Amino acid sequence: MNNTKLTQDENLSIKVSYQLLPTDHQRLDLYFSLPVEMGIGPKTLAEEHYFHSSIENHSAYYSDQLHIPLVRSRFISQTKGEQSDYRLNLNLFSYQIRIALDTDIKQTIKLRESESFYPQAIVLAEQISGLLKKLRRYTPPDKKLSPFFENADNYLSWQVEQSFLKLLSRGPKSSDFTTERNFLFALCRSESEYREANQYNSQITLDDPNRITNKMRLLQRLIEYGVVLQQEVKSLNRNLKRIVSGTVTAVIMAFVMMLVLNARANFTEVTIALVGMLGFVYGLREIFKDDITRVIWRYIQKGLPKWKNIYTNSVNKNRIATQTIWLEYIRNKDLPKKVDKLFQNRRHQNKQAAQLLHFRSDTKVNAKSFMPGYDEIQQRIYFNLTPFIRFLKKGEGRLYSLDGSKVTKQAVERRYQINVVLMQTDKKDLQQTQRFKITLNRSTIVNIEAMKADDDD
C-alpha cells in the first residue's frame, strides 16, 4: 500500500493509518475473516456494539517529519502574532514531540539485543533533551501566556519521564551497559526534579497515581487543541429505522385487531376463554414484533452506510473532512473477486470455516488547504480485538517429546489466527490490496505479517 499502514497498537488492538491531501478522497475496506471457533457473529457481537465500543477514529494535521518536530518561527518569539497564535504554535510543537517520542520509543522497545537497544536509547534521550531545552528557552514573560506554556511543559516533562521508565522496564538487562542505564535514569530524575522545582503539581496529586494520571490526560487534551480535528459522530438511517419499525408495528397491530374482532364475534359475552384468547394474541404480537422488525431492518440496511464522522478545526470550526462508515457481516459471495482471491491463496488446512466482517470507510477532504506547515492530515482507525477472543479457551497445552529413554514436556500456548484483507481505493479508482495474517492469544497480538500475493500460509 502506498500510504496505508496496518500495525499493532496495544496488546490486543491494531491501527490503520493513512494520509490525505487537500480535496482528497479515499475509500478503505477491511475484510476480517474470523474463524467460527471464535464464536463471533450477528447474534453474539452486534455491529453497532462493536463500532461504539471497539472502533475509534482519529484525525489530525500531519507532518512526515516525525523525528524532528515542526517548529514555526512565530512560536519562538511570543511577541509576534496574537495570543491564539502562540497557543496554536505551542500546541503544534508539543504534539509533534509527543508523536515523535511515542513512535521512537515503540521502535526502540522492539530491539531485543542490548548492543543495539542502549545506543539507540541514548540517541533518543539526547534528542528529546535538546527539544525540551528548545521549548524552555523561550519562556513567555506575559502572564496571559504562561498557563499555556506551563501546561505543555508539565505534560511533556512527565511524558518523557514515563516513556523512558517504560523503555528501561521493557528493555534488555545487561551489566555491560550500566553507564547507559544510569544516563537514562538521570534523565528521568532530572525531569521529576524540574517539575518539583517549578511546582507544577501539588503533593496531594503526586501521592495519588490516579490523580496525576488523569491530570496528565487532561493536559494532553489541552495540547491537542487546534491540532487534532474535532469529531462529531452522526448515526445514519435513524429515520428510516423508525419508519420500518412503525410500519411493522402497524401491520402486526392490524393483524392482531383482526384476530381480536373475530374473537369478539365468536364470543357473545366476556368469558375466561375470550380473555385467554386475547392474552394469547397479544403475547404473540410481543414475541414476534421485535424479531420481525430486526429481520426486515437487517435486510433493508444491507449495504447502507451506518455512521458519518464530521471533522472540524477546533479553532475556527471550519469543516475539514467527512468520513462515512459501513460495518456489517457478509457472506462469501459478497466478497470482491480480488479479496476472495487473496483469501483463497492459503493452504487447504488453513481454509477453515469463518465469519466475514466488512468495515468500509469513505473519507472526503473538504478543505482546499491546511494550516501553514501542513500539507496532509492523517486518518487513524483503531480496532480493539478483545471482543473477538472473549469466547476462546483459556490455559496452555503441553507438548511431549522423547529424549532417549526420558519423556520431556514443554508448555505451549493456544494461538489463533485472523486474516484481514485491506483494500485501498483512491479518487482515481485505483485499487491496491494487501492480506495480513494476525496471530494472537488471549492476552496479546503475537505477530502481524503482511502476506505477499503469491504466499501460501
Image (tube, rainbow, N blue to C red):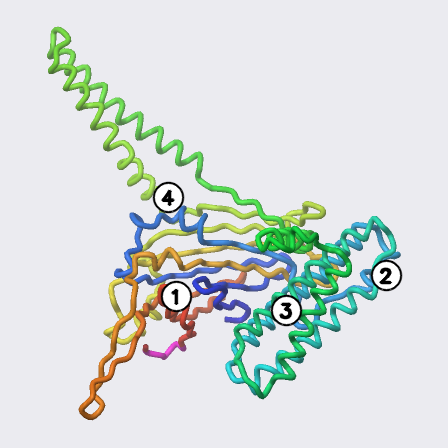
Asked if the stretch drawn in magenta spans residue 58, the answer is: no
- Above or below, 384 relative to 419: above
Left or right of 122 in this view: 244: left
Q: Are marks 4 and 3 in contact (CB under 8 Å)?
A: no
In the foreground, 386 or 330: 386
Q: Which residue is mark 1?
A: 420
Give the CA distance from mark 4 to mark 3: 43 Å
Q: Residues within 10 Å of mark 4 (few under 14, many from 20)?
A: some
Q: Secondary structure at mark 1?
A: strand
**Reading the chain from its start, which is encountered first: label 4 or label 2?**
2
Q: Amino acid at mark 2?
A: Ser
**Reading the chain from its start, which is encountered first: label 4 or label 3?**
3
Magenta region: which residues? 452-456
Q: Secondary structure at mark 2?
A: loop
Q: Amino acid at mark 1?
A: Val
Q: Are marks 1 and 2 in contact (CB under 8 Å)?
A: no
Q: Are marks 1 and 4 in contact (CB under 8 Å)?
A: no
Give the CA distance from mark 3 to mark 1: 29 Å
Left or right of 347 in this view: 97: right
Q: Which residue is mark 2?
A: 77
Q: Amino acid at mark 4?
A: Gln
Q: Quadrant of residue 341?
A: bottom left
Task: Identify the disc placed on residue 301.
Answer: 4
Q: In the image, residue 374 lies at what x, y percent?
A: 70, 62
Q: Secondary structure at mark 3?
A: helix
Q: Amino acid at mark 3?
A: Leu
Give the CA distance from mark 1 to mark 4: 24 Å
- Above or below, 202 relative to 106: above
Q: Which residue is mark 3?
A: 101
Q: In the image, residue 165 lies at what x, y percent?
A: 60, 70
